[in-house]
Image (cartoon, grey):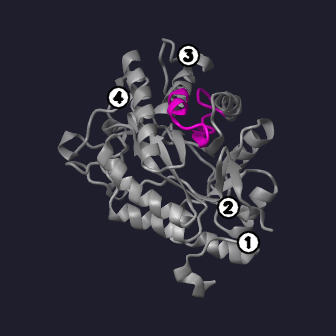
Amino acid sequence: MSALFEPYALREVTIPNRVWMPPMCQYSAAPEGPDTGTPNDWHFAHYAARAAGGTGLIVVEATGVSPEGRISPWDLGIWNDTQVQAFRRITRFLVSQGTVPAIQLAHAGRKASTDRPWKGGAPVGPDSYGWQPVAPSAIPFADGHPVPTELTVDGIREVVGQFADAARRALDAGFEIAEIHGAHGYLINEFLSPYSNHRTDEYGGSYENRTRFALQVVDAVRAVWPQDKPLFFRISATDWLAEDGWTADDTVRFAADLKAHGVDLLDVSTGGNASGVHIPVGPGYQVPFAARVKAETSLPVAAVGLITDAEQAEKIIANDEADAVLLGRELLRNPSWARHAARELGGDVHVPDQYHRSV
């Protein structure tokens, strides 16, 4: 049997295969009014198509734990009950197709309040639904970005509470897995990296201090997330900096800490915290980082990064480089990638009754 289409169990949740969809922002929610941050027909159609296509697990895009935690004014949020009710429509359909619904809980930190990518992605101000970003230190992400407000200790505690509240709502919305976004230069990643964290209090300086906020978020979410349901953490395994950044060695060390605090799987990506760095992008370019965590720790991992064809994905699982693969752009191009890969590899995948003629 194809390794890619073997079920995978974490705690009391069984995912039907190892073809997973990572969080990919759609920038399609209302930026203001009563439906701010609320999933709509676009989000339903987008996620429903990938579930009907056989994807084993779908991680709904970075979802703000507060209005200020969104990357853009057009992002999803989960800070009120209107949003919860709208998410239920999506999770119900995913479950009906045998897909496990997951959600990424996020705070964008200093990279918040930006325009949609197809509009250039530049920072936006109050005249375009924007707001003042916050960060561990008053250091802008890049030229042209605003200087963020440095979070106070009370502010940090408030954000920790927002993650816990968001997790409670995610459970109410029908999600089976929660993922904490600690990657791509957003708030948690900003605290982890000495490149973006210049604090001199208990949240800055040493490795132990820089990881304190992330572990407090994990503890707060794990305290409200049921023990029978898995918790993921997404990490940028490296800042791709020659010095003064977060490194692969840090990631291996932190993986052990995360496991000790109740994280069940590390979703391994890279980059996003430093602008203008050289990243050697190519097929499977981030897989070695996941493979190293898997080889050197006991924490399960998922790999991501230009994984596009069935044989490539199969080898990653069969060679024990990762426990699952996350296909981003390829699933945007082909919602039924899992079904096509199953046909190629001889695996079994859910096919809706309505599509039985396509088998």
- The residue type indicated by label 4 comes to Pro
Quadrant containing the N terminus in the rendered view: bottom right
Q: Earlier in the sequence, mark 3 or mark 4?
A: 4
Disc 3 from disc 4: Cα separation: 19 Å
Q: Is residue 234 magenta?
A: yes
SS of the residue at dot 4?
Answer: loop
Q: Which residue is mark 3?
A: 205
The percent position of residue 83, horizontal first and vertical second, equals 33, 49
Q: How many marks?
A: 4
Residue position for label 4? 148
Q: Amino acid at mark 1?
A: Gly
Whether pointer 1 and pointer 2 mark residues with C-beta atoms closer than 8 Å, the reply is: yes
For marks 1 and 4, give the one nearer the viewer.
Answer: 1
* Callout 3 crowding tier (Cα within 10 Å): few <14, some 14–19, many ≥20: some
Q: Earlier in the sequence, mark 4 or mark 2?
A: 2
Separation (CA) of disc 3 from disc 2: 41 Å
Q: Residue at x 21, y 46 (%)?
A: 128
Marks 3 and 1, Cα distance to the nearest angstrom? Answer: 49 Å
Instruction: Give yes or no for residue 336 being in the magenta stretch.
Output: no
Q: Amino acid at mark 2?
A: Asn
Q: Between label 3 and label 1, give the one nearer the viewer.
A: 1
**Part of the protein shown in magenta:** 219-247
Q: At 64% across and 76% down in the image, what residue appears?
A: 340
Q: Along the polypeptide, which appears first: circle 1 or circle 2?
A: 2
Residue 3 as seen in the image, left or right of residue 102:
right
The image's mark for residue 347 is: 1
Does any portion of residue 223 appear in the rendered image?
A: yes
Residue 88 shown left or right of residue 33 in the figure: right
355, 318: nearer the viewer: 355
Q: Earlier in the sequence, mark 3 or mark 2?
A: 2
Query: Do the residues bearing badges 3 and 1 touch, measured as CB atoms within 8 Å?
Result: no
Label placed on residue 17:
2
